[in-house]
Image (tube, rainbow, N blue to C red):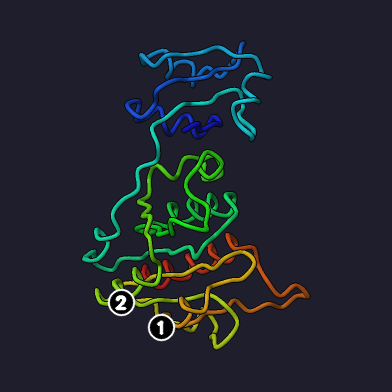
Amino acid sequence: MLVYGRNVACEYLKKVEKVRKIYLLEGFRDQKLLSIIGKTKIPVVNCSKNELDQLVNGVHQGIILDVVDFSYVNVDQFYEEEDCFLVILDHLEDPHNFGAIIRTSEAAGVNGIIIPKDRGVLVNGTVIKTSVGASENIDISLVTNLHHTIEELKKHGFWIIGTGFENSVDYRDIDYSGKIVLVIGNEGSGISPIIQRSCDFMAKIPMYGKVNSLNASVAAGIMIYEVVKQKKG
């Protein structure tokens, strides 16, 4: 898998065993990164800008790493964690939204993120770049069936909070103590009906302007920090 960007490279080079090769722009001048690279035995390939542009479809900032594929964790590891806070993404499609949610979740101390194997974005180079490497510091689980996973989480004492406008209450009026799962829906269709029926509460963020919806990653950020505020308060 190819990942790119200077901040991402800094994160990955803390775990050199995950890096197989480095593609570097000819004349690369970031002395901090050059110093780190110089202390490793990772093969370096010097490339023209055009050659780098052909490797990835994104702003690579002169450095691309060939790394081992992303390692997902087993969802079972979350079941017995005390006061656990998880985020489920219900078939999110935009890698930039996914990356932004990873970055916010890691910064807020979320225990883990759960995503489905099908019909949604997986962890890729764009997601990692948008997360600024935070994907390396948070557990992400890939599951076959979201509905089944939610039912298992409920058996282990988790409360499931969905996001939407139908049959919902103000997100600030919900008690987030205990083990919590926050479900963020698809950018276009929101949370699927079967997942909605599994939710214990549906939360809404009040809108005071003329636009009646928020970007998925923005809504996730607002909700995540409300949960954290209550848990830490």
The amino acid on which the numbered mark 1 sits, given as a three-letter code, is Asp
**Whether residue 197 is situated above or below residue 141 in the rendered picture:** below
Q: Which residue is mark 1?
A: 200
Residue 210 x %, y %? 78, 75
Numbered mark located on residue 157 in the image: none
Which residue in the rendered view is the most extreme toward the right? 210
Q: CA distance from mark 1 to mark 2?
A: 9 Å
Q: Which residue is mark 2?
A: 154
Residue under the image location 34 percent in, 71 percent down: 148
Residue 226 x %, y %? 48, 70
- Left or right, residue 230 beside residue 206: left
- Left or right, residue 82 beside residue 105: left
Tell me whether circle 1 and circle 2 mark residues in contact (CB < 8 Å). yes
The amino acid on which the numbered mark 2 sits, given as a three-letter code, is Lys
- Front residue of 32 and 118: 118
> Which type of secondary structure does the marked residue at label 2 adopt?
helix
Which residue in the rendered view is the most extreme toward the left? 80
Residue 39 x %, y %? 37, 14
Q: Residues within 10 Å of mark 1 (few under 14, many from 20)?
A: few
- Front residue of 68 and 162: 68
**Whether residue 19 is situated above or below residue 231 in the rendered picture:** above
- Front residue of 171 and 59: 59
> Which type of secondary structure does the marked residue at label 1 adopt?
loop
**Whether residue 197 is situated above or below residue 81 in the rendered picture:** below
Residue under the image location 60 percent in, 62 percent down: 218
Residue under the image location 41 percent in, 80 percent down: 198
In which quadrant of the rendered image does the C terminus lie?
A: bottom left
Q: State which quadrant residue 78 falls in.
A: bottom left
Residue under the image location 55 percent in, 52 percent down: 100
